[in-house]
Image (cartoon, helix red, strand yellow):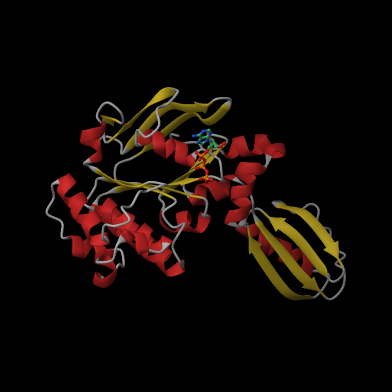
């Protein structure tokens, strides 16, 4: 049986009185792309730092590719590629030299120029000292270093933070290509779109704990967010709307009728019922956005029950 790419049990880190990570149970399967989402201060970097053995856990265990992250660190780090939050570049060394050193360390036969080209660094840039690089260029270089040795697992901490939209798209393509090659990818972000575009599964962490783990589609479904349907009407409808199944939060305002439809069918029933007694001149449908979803999972303390109910059946997290 293939070992999971990442497996943690009860992983916990306290900094004095602050519980940065609180009993995290996480399994990322081999070959999976897992997006690790959470607002600032949620515990993402601390988790990654424990996985990389940069920080020791207060409690719990963590293994990657079946190896203990601390006891078997050396062996493990030859098989993974990492872009940590604070990747250190050597200011005086060229980009190319950074990659060459990684090739030597991992004892592989990668061609540094090919890797640099893959991450979008031109040969000219590759020859310049890393101290002269912009944030985005530094991030690209860190990624090239991470790709050395065709790692079985890529761990990327906020990999798009310094990239422009083009760079972010290229990174997504690269993540997909690496995944197709067979690598598992674990990457943290607080930008939902980045995660949605590539992740098979996402875990949302808040206050050091998972509040949800599943595919984006399942998370969205679990939230019951529905779609807000707004109908522009000729005059106020006389129809009874309150008894419509799966339509809630109905509002009738000057010239418009709004309702939240929880199922696709409910949109049609809602529109039909309104049209029975008035003319509908326009229809606007807003699906619940990822931002709504994220906010609901991470800040909606009043809604704890609903959030818990939405937290996920099957996924192990
Ligand atoms: N070395 C440290 N000493 C004290 N507290 C720390 C330390 N590192 C992290 N923390 C605290 O742990 C919590 C989690 O921080 P962490 O950096 O893991 O969050 P994050 O999800 O990565 O946030 P961001 O998205 O802002 O990078 C925060 O409350 C932070 O202040």
Above or below, comparing residue 114 to residue 232 in the picture? above
Taking depth in this image into account, of 50 and 308 the one nearest to the observer is 50
Q: Residue at x 27, y 60 (%)?
A: 95
Where does residue 98 sit, x and y in percent of width and height? 24, 55
Q: Quadrant of the C terminus?
A: top left
Above or below, comparing residue 271 to residue 79 in the picture? below
Q: Quadrant of the N terminus?
A: top left
Where does residue 152 sit, x and y in percent of width and height? 24, 45
> Outermost residue toward the top?
59
In the displayed structure image, the side of residue 237 where residue 297 appears, left or right: left
**Can residue 1 be seen from the camera position used here?**
no
Taking depth in this image into account, of 43 and 317 the one nearest to the observer is 43
**Badge count:** 0
**Can residue 289 be seen from the camera position used here?**
yes
Where does residue 283 sit, x and y in percent of width and height? 70, 71
Q: Residue at x 28, y 51 (%)?
A: 146
Q: Residue at x 18, y 45 (%)?
A: 105
> Outermost residue toward the front?
92
In the displayed structure image, the side of residue 1 where residue 193 appears, left or right: right
Q: Residue at x 88, y 65 (%)?
A: 238
Where does residue 103 sit, x and y in percent of width and height? 17, 51
Taking depth in this image into account, of 92 and 260 the one nearest to the observer is 92
Taking depth in this image into account, of 59 and 35 the one nearest to the observer is 59
Image-quadrant location for residue 304: top right
């Amino acid at each position: 049986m293939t070992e999971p790419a990442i497996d943690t049990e009860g992983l916990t880190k306290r900094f004095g009185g602050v519980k940065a990570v609180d009993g995290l149970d996480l399994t990322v399967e081999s070959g999976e792309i897992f997006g690790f989402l959470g607002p600032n201060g949620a515990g993402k970097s601390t988790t990654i730092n424990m996985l990389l053995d940069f920080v020791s856990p207060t409690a719990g265990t963590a293994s990657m590719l079946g190896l203990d992250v601390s006891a078997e660190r050396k062996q493990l780090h030859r098989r993974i590629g990492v872009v940590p939050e604070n990747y250190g570049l050597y200011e005086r060394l060229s980009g190319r030299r950074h990659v060459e050193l990684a090739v030597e360390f991992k004892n592989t036969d990668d061609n540094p120029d090919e890797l640099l080209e893959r991450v979008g660094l031109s040969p000219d840039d590759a020859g310049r000292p890393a101290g002269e690089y912009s944030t985005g260029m530094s991030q690209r270089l860190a990624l090239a270093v991470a790709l050395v040795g065709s790692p079985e697992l890529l761990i990327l901490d906020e990999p798009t933070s310094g990239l422009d939209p083009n760079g972010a798209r290229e990174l997504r393509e690269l993540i997909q290509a690496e995944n197709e090659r067979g690598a598992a990818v674990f990457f943290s972000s607080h930008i939902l779109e980045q995660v949605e575009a590539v992740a098979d599964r996402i875990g949302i962490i808040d206050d050091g704990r998972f509040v949800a783990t599943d595919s984006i589609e399942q998370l969205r479904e679990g939230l019951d967010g529905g779609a807000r349907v707004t109908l522009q009407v000729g005059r106020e409808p006389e129809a009874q709307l309150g008894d419509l199944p799966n339509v809630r939060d109905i509002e009738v305002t000057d010239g418009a009728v709004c309702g939240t439809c929880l199922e696709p069918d409910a949109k049609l029933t809602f529109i039909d019922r309104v049209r029975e007694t008035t003319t509908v001149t326009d229809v606007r449908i807003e699906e619940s956005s990822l931002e709504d979803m994220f906010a609901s999972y991470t800040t909606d303390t009043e809604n704890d029950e609903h959030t818990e109910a939405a937290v996920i059946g099957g996924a192990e997290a």
